[in-house]
Image (cartoon, helix red, strand yellow):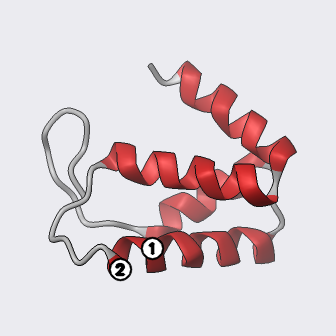
C-alpha cells in the first residue's frame, strides 16, 4: 500500500476492521466488510495500491450497506486532514 506521504507498507485488513469497529459496526459486519474490500483490492492485481483508494473503497462499502456508519466514517476522515 502506498501512503499519502509516499511511503509504502504492507496492507493489513486488521486496520480496516479496527476502524469499522470504532465507527460502530458489529464484529461480524466489520469482518465481512473488510473481507469484501480485501477481495476487491486483490482483484486489481497491483503490487501497490494507494491508501486513498482503500479509504474510498471503505466509504463506498459503508455507503452501500451502512449509511449511518458511513456518515461517522466520513466525519472521522475529515478530522485526519
Question: Closer to the camera, 17 or 46?
Answer: 46
Q: From this view, report whether residue 63 is shown above or below residue 65.
A: above
**Label 1 to label 2: alpha-carbon separation:** 5 Å
Instruction: Tell me the quadrant of the picture where the N terminus can be found.
Output: bottom left
In the picture, measured across the screen, residue 63 lies left or right of residue 1, that is right
Q: Which residue is drawn at the image coordinates 47% and 69% (left, top)?
A: 13
Q: Which residue is drawn at the image coordinates 84% and 66% (left, top)?
A: 26
Q: Quadrant of residue 54?
A: bottom left
Q: Which residue is drawn at the image coordinates 56% and 54% (left, top)?
A: 58
Considering the numbered disc 2 on the image, is that residue within a helix, a strand or a loop? helix
Q: Which residue is mark 1?
A: 40
Contact flag, marks 1 and 2 (Cβ < 8 Å): yes
Q: From this view, report whether residue 71 is shown above or below residue 75.
A: below
Q: Position of residue 4 (x, y in %)?
A: 25, 35
Instruction: Tell me the quadrant of the picture where the C terminus can be found.
Output: top left
Q: Position of residue 21 (x, y in %)?
A: 72, 57
Q: Which residue is drawn at the image coordinates 38% and 50% (left, top)?
A: 53
In the picture, measured across the screen, residue 39 lies left or right of residue 73, that is left
Q: Which residue is mark 2?
A: 43
Q: From this view, report whether residue 62 is shown above or below residue 77.
A: below
Q: Quadrant of residue 78?
A: top right
Q: Position of residue 38 (x, y in %)?
A: 46, 74
Mark carried by residue 11:
none
Amino acid at each position: 500500500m502506498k501512503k499519502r506521504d509516499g511511503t509504502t507498507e504492507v496492507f493489513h485488513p486488521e486496520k480496516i476492521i479496527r476502524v469499522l469497529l470504532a465507527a460502530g459496526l458489529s464484529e461480524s459486519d466489520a469482518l465481512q466488510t473488510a473481507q469484501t474490500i480485501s477481495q476487491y483490492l486483490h482483484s486489481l492485481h497491483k503490487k501497490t495500491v494507494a491508501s486513498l483508494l482503500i479509504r474510498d473503497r471503505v466509504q463506498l462499502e459503508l455507503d452501500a450497506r451502512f449509511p449511518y456508519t458511513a456518515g461517522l466514517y466520513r466525519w472521522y476522515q475529515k478530522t485526519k486532514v
